Every structure is written in C-alpha cells, then in structure tokens.
Image: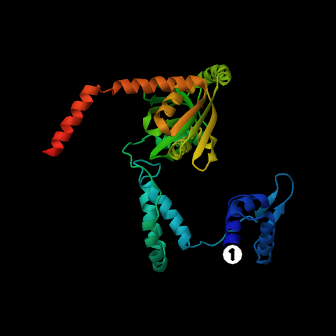
C-alpha cells in the first residue's frame, strides 16, 4: 500500500515511465506494471502515453487527500532538519525551526512518543561554523535563472571580481558552497558562499569575450594534465574519499590498502603537492617522480624547521627527568 501511494504521489507531480518508477522505488519494472493494474482496479484514473517520451499520467485534477506521516517518515524529516540547525546560515533560517515545531504539533501523541527516543540515538554530524553567508539566497536565484554574474570574492590569496555562472548551491562540512563555471579558471569550481561580498548581473559582451578566452586556455590545460597514483592507509582512504573531485577515484587493493589514481590538471599542481603532503604517512605516492621529489623537499624543510641539536635534546631530557624526581 505504501508503494501504491508513492506511485500516485509521484504521478501527481509529473509523468513517469514504469522504469523510472521502478528505479525510484527499488523494485522491478514488472512489479510496477502489476501496481498500475492494481491502481486501475481501485478506480485511480490513470492513463498511458505511448512513444519515446511516453509514460503514465493521472487524469487532470485528480489529487490524493492529505496524508499523515508515519513514524519512519517523521524520523527521516526531523533528523534531516536537525542537521540544518547546525549551520549558521541557510536559505530558510526561520523555517528550519518553525517546521520542526509544526511537525511535532501535528504528530499524534503515540507516534511522537516513538519518535522522540529515536531522535536521541540518531544524528547527521555537521561541524559547527560561525561564518554567515548573507548572499546565499541571491546565489540560489542566479542558479535557478542560469544567469551569469559578477562576484566580488575573497579567497585565501585574492580579493577580486570574478565572472561566474552558478550551477548549484550545496552544504558540506558545515559550509555552504556554490559550484560555478569560471572563465578565469577555465572550469567548474567550488566557491565558499560566505566569501562572496558582492554580486552583480554580468555584461553579456564581457561574458562572450571571457568564455572564448577560456576555451583556448582549457585546451592547453587538458594537454598538461598529470597522472597521479598513490597507495593509501585506511585513514588516508577516508580523507581522500571526502574530496569532491577525486573521492570516486579510490579503490581497494587489499583489506587494509587502497589506491587513488587520477589525472591532475596542470593548473592544480600546487593543490596536489599540498594535499598529499598533508596526508603524511597515510599516503605513498607511486607516480609521478616529480611529485615524490616535491614531497621529499617539503619533508626535509619541515625536519630542518624542527631540528633539535643532540646536545639540546639531551639537556632537555635530563631536565625533564630531574623534574620528575623532584
């Protein structure tokens, strides 16, 4: 019955093929066909549209009456909403609190008694952040319109105007990010939403000029890509999997050994050296030799920075032992 209701709800939103419904509900196409027959026998006004873009539809104007959430559905919504409350900013600051209160209010007391203990056992871990993103709603608006924008952006190295075409806005690791195409970089990049200081509509002529320049730059960058391979410990694997660009390039070699293998654009070489140096002993770069050499030099510089003379170390050790005896 839950699946039949889910099918009707889906068809209220849009036309769906049997295969699309099967994929969403994780059943076979044959099961969906049987469900369609059952719905027709129940008097639900369904009809099929033939052709390559065909599928099932509901008769115009048909709607299910309002439905109550069951315990598991309520738990799903509340766990997700509680994760949002960890963010200092969201596109719906007030609503994230009021909707939780409303759900608790409309839930039958018996169901609420079942949900409350489970909420204490489950959570989506989100780091607490204090950064505000006052232009978050404007970014979402540019994404929805597919419009180009001029953005005054503050990065670790620069504070400058960038021409961007936002594609999506998402939350990760306690921050809000905007994925946008940047002609300056010649690729899709992720930008921290809290680092946008000003947004303006872009001039169409400027967009055309910068996009044409980016096409030629990107062609050169592709030819300069570098293959990077490295074995990873369990802890290294967990860290690499969190990277949005190369996380899917990790695969297991043995029970306790993994490998990452990917093409690194030449423009991202500095990122690669910092990334693998930060992994330390949890990664062993196999190739290229240039990256191994850079990591060796970085490690040697770090050793020199923290070098302690033998005499100093012995003196420190002796002083520490004397303090312990006292």
Identify the image quadrant of residue 319. top left
Above/below status of 263 relative to 138: above
Above/below status of 121 relative to 319: below
Q: Which of 294 and 14 is in front in this view?
A: 294
Above/below status of 164 relative to 79: above
Residue 201 shows up from this direction: no
Above/below status of 206 relative to 171: above
Give the residue at the far right of this rendering. 51
* Local crowd size for mark 1, using a 10 Å CA cut-off: few (<14), some (14–19), many (≥20): few
Placement of the C terminus among the 4 image quadrants: top left
> Picture coordinates of residue 126 (x, y %)?
44, 52
**Residue at the image point whose x is 80% and y is 77% from the top:** 41
Residue 97 shows up from this direction: yes
Q: Which of 316 and 246 is in front in this view?
A: 316
Placement of the N terminus among the 4 image quadrants: bottom right
**Residue at the image point whose x is 69% and y is 60% from the top:** 24
> Picture coordinates of residue 148 (x, y %)?
58, 32
Q: Where does label 1 land, which residue?
A: 1
> Picture coordinates of residue 89 (x, y %)?
42, 47
């Amino acid at each position: 019955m839950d699946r039949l209701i889910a099918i009707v709800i889906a068809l209220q939103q849009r036309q769906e093929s049997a295969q699309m419904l099967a994929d969403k509900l994780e059943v076979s196409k044959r099961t969906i066909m049987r469900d369609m027959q059952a719905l027709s026998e129940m008097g639900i006004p369904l009809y099929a549209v033939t052709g390559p873009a065909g599928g099932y539809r509901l008769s115009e104007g048909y709607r299910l009456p309002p439905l109550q959430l069951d315990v598991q559905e309520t738990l799903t919504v509340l766990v997700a909403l509680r994760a949002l409350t960890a963010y200092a900013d969201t596109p719906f600051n007030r609503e994230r609190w009021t909707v939780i209160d409303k759900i608790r209010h409309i839930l039958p007391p018996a169901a609420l008694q079942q949900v409350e203990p489970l909420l204490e056992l489950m959570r989506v871990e989100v780091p607490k952040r204090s950064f505000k993103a006052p232009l978050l709603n404007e970014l979402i608006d540019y994404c929805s319109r597919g419009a180009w924008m001029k953005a005054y952006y503050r990065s670790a190295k620069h504070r400058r105007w960038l021409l961007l075409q936002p594609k999506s806005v998402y939350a990760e690791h306690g921050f809000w990010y905007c994925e946008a195409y940047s002609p300056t970089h010649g690729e899709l990049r992720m930008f921290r939403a809290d680092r946008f200081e000003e947004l303006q509509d872009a001039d169409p002529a400027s967009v055309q000029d910068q996009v044409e320049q980016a096409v030629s730059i990107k062609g050169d960058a592709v030819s300069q890509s570098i293959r990077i391979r490295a074995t990873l410990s369990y802890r290294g694997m967990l860290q690499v999997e969190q990277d949005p660009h190369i996380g899917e390039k990790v695969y297991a070699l043995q029970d306790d050994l993994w490998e990452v293998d990917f093409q690194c654009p030449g423009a991202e070489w500095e990122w690669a050296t910092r990334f693998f140096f930060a992994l330390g002993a949890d990664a062993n770069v196999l190739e290229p030799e240039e990256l191994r050499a850079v990591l060796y030099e970085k490690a040697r510089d770090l050793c020199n920075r923290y070098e302690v003379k033998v005499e100093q170390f012995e003196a420190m050790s002796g002083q520490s032992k004397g303090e312990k005896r006292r």
